[in-house]
Image (cartoon, grey):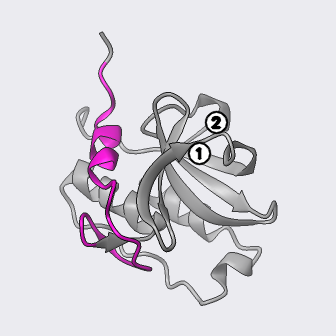
Amino acid sequence: MCSDPAALVYARAWIGTPYILGAAVRGAGCDCVGLVRGVWSDLTGKPAPTPPPWRADWANSSARLLVDAARRYLEPIDIDAAKPGDVVVLRVHDTREAHCGILENDGQFIHAMEGVGVVCVPFDAYRPGVSYAARFPDVAAG
């Protein structure tokens, strides 16, 4: 029997965390990047990485800030190889990479929604916007 990756187990523990822009504290608050930072911290036992110095309009720029941040801490993978426990970066309105989350089993997606918090929802509506995928480091092999 195949067990779920540790990243997915940790991601589930964040469900219900309120949405707070820039935060990464399970149960207290996070945004989408904070969720990924927090799971990374849970996995590695290290403090969550400091997010890049976002400008208020970062999501409207052509820079790939989410992807650049992911490349520093996660292992890039082909989008088609993404599986439960992996991180995906999404284009919003087909133009800007402004959201990320963690794939769950059975076509679900764990992410932090503004005004809602961390939830698990069907991934189908988000799938067309996927522009990048990455895997958390394999700390068990370490």
Q: Is residue 123 magenta?
A: no
Mark 1 and mark 2: span between their CA atoms?
A: 6 Å
The residue singled out by tag 2 in the image is: 78
**Residue 48 visible in rendering:** yes
Outermost residue, right direction?
94
Q: Position of residue 8 (x, y in %)?
A: 35, 39
Q: Position of residue 43 (x, y in %)?
A: 25, 48
Q: Position of residue 62 (x, y in %)?
A: 77, 74
- The tag on residue 47 is none
Magenta stretch: dominant SS? loop
Q: Amino acid at mark 1?
A: Ala
- Residue extent of the magenta highlight: 3-28
- Which residue lies at the image location 26% right of the left edge and 50% below the top edge? 13
Q: Amino acid at mark 2?
A: Asp
The answer to which quarter of the image holds residue 98 is bottom right
Query: Along the horizontal axis of the image, is 74 left or right of 141?
Result: right
Compared to residue 53, the image places residue 71 above or below, namely above
Q: Are marks 1 and 2 in contact (CB under 8 Å)?
A: yes
- Which residue lies at the image location 61% right of the left edge and 70% below the top edge? 65
* SS assignment at label 1: strand
Compared to residue 67, the image places residue 3 above or below, namely above
* SS assignment at label 2: loop
- Which residue lies at the image location 49% right of the left edge and 78% below the top edge? 52
Residue situated in front as seen by the camera: 85 or 65: 85
- Dot 1, how many residues are within 10 Å of its Cα: few (below 14), some (14-19), or many (20+)? many
Q: Is residue 15 magenta?
A: yes
- The tag on residue 133 is 1
Compared to residue 5, the image places residue 112 above or below, namely below
- Which residue lies at the image location 39% right of the left edge and 67% below the top edge? 34
Q: Which one is earlier in the sequence, the residue at label 1 or at label 2? A: 2
Q: Position of residue 120 (x, y in %)?
A: 45, 47
The answer to which quarter of the image holds residue 47 is bottom left
